[in-house]
Amino acid sequence: MVSFRQVSKSYGAVRAVCDLGLELFPGETVALLGPNGAGKSSTLAKPTTGMDVTARQAFWGAMRRQAQEGRTVLFATHYLEEADAIADRVIVLHRGRVPADGTAVEIKSRAGARRVTFDLDEPTDRGALDGLPAPLSLEVSGRTVRIQSRDADATVHALLKDVALLAGYLLVFTAGAAGLYRKDTHKA
């Protein structure tokens, strides 16, 4: 087992890692996931940056074999998809701290709420929106509607069934991911 306790790293006044504590176990593949500035590179470099698809696949095949032989593999990435495909465990770093640590499925479920944003074609009664499926929260500001949803697919499907409600765009942001879905709903 490898153990880090109270690890900190500063660059001048900037605290890149703040009292980080981790335990890594033999045969475990661990992804440090976070945006630029989260503290990942202060802990370990991103190994596949600049590799083409074939080289990346070969690299990860070699790393899986290392883990199968009982070695611990620790890597940093910006991509939840890469962490999901490779790692047994994902440690999320944000501003040098660990807000989440678990399997990729656990991390995705914690970040599972997605934000659906759109403009109304015309002002409407909030009650017309209350029947949308899976909302965690619903905010109407002028003609702009923002919904945090447990099931954005169901919410979007319901909105598209009543496309007259929409003024021209529909955005779905996935929490914790850089993905953005844009569906043009302009009427012909």
Image (spheres, helix red, strand yellow):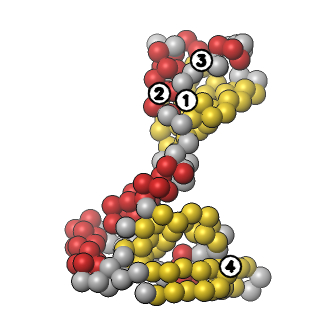
Q: From the viewer's perspective, is the residue at label 1 or at label 4 nearer? A: 1
Q: Residues within 10 Å of mark 1 (few under 14, many from 20)?
A: some
Res. 131 mark: 3
Q: Which residue is mark 2?
A: 154
Q: Quadrant of the N terminus?
A: bottom left
* Number of marks drawn: 4
Q: Earlier in the sequence, mark 4 or mark 3?
A: 4
The residue lying at 67 percent from left, 33 percent from top is 137
Disc 1 is placed on an element classified as loop
User: CA gap, disc 2 to disc 4?
Assistant: 40 Å
Q: Amino acid at mark 4?
A: Cys
Q: Check if mark 1's residue and mark 2's residue have beta carbons within 8 Å.
A: yes
Q: Earlier in the sequence, mark 1 or mark 4?
A: 4
Disc 4 is placed on an element classified as strand
The residue lying at 63 percent from left, 18 percent from top is 129
Disc 3 is placed on an element classified as loop
Q: Quadrant of residue 21?
A: bottom right
Q: Earlier in the sequence, mark 2 or mark 4?
A: 4
- In this view, 144 is above or below 177: above
Q: Quadrant of residue 105?
A: bottom left
Q: Earlier in the sequence, mark 1 or mark 2?
A: 1
Q: Which residue is mark 1?
A: 134
Q: Amino acid at mark 2?
A: Ala
Res. 18 mark: 4
